[in-house]
Image: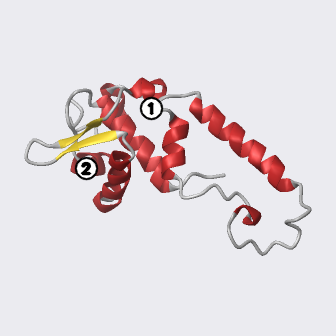
Amino acid sequence: MQLTKFSDFALRVLMYVHAAGDRRVTIEEMAASYQISRAHLMKVVNTLTRTGYLTAVRGRSGGLKLARPADEIRLGAVIRDTEPDFALVECFATGSQCVITGCCRLPRVLNKALSAFLDTLDEHTLESIALKPRDFRRVLDPESHVLS
């Protein structure tokens, strides 16, 4: 199983916003730091705001902050809110054409594996994976002082 880029970017956005502390960050700042399309990040931020992970303030001194403490943001919840589906195989999706769907035992095994995957993510919070501003400065553009 591979997460979509959307979910990957959502986790990165949350980590970046958390590392900024009380300072509001902008989509432009994150797009430049991560070298990701601003338009794509806008969609990610919109979802994270709509689902209650971020608070967005418009205007000149606007930007993004976490909507709740990082230790209350479960990674499993973020993935459930950002992944479009968990159809690991054809028979999980609507309109399956698989001819052995009625007697196949594979879906039960895959559902158990998917549950274990999500349960593991539920054990971790944004706080548990958070990076410090110095970590970002070290791996992102060393000339930039975006998270100062």
Rendering coords of residue 56 (x, y %): 23, 44
Quarter of the image that includes the C terminus: top left
Q: How is the image coloured?
A: secondary structure
Secondary structure under tag 2 reads helix
- Where 79 sits versus 97, above or below? above
Q: Determine which residue is flagged by label 1.
A: 73
Q: Residue at 88% of width from left, 65% of height from top?
A: 102
| For residue 6, side relative to residue 139 (left or right) | right
Q: Determine which residue is flagged by label 2.
A: 27
Rendering coords of residue 136 (x, y %): 34, 33
| Disc on the earlier residue, 1 or 2 | 2
Residue situated in front as seen by the camera: 41 or 147: 41
Look at the image and tell me whether residue 45 can be seen: yes
| For residue 90, side relative to residue 45 (left or right) | right
Identify residue type, mark 2.
Ile
Look at the image and tell me whether residue 140 can be seen: no
CA–CA distance in space, label 1 to label 2: 20 Å
- Where 78 sits versus 103, above or below? above
Crowd rating for badge 1 (residues with CA inside 10 Å; few <14, some 14–19, many 20+): many
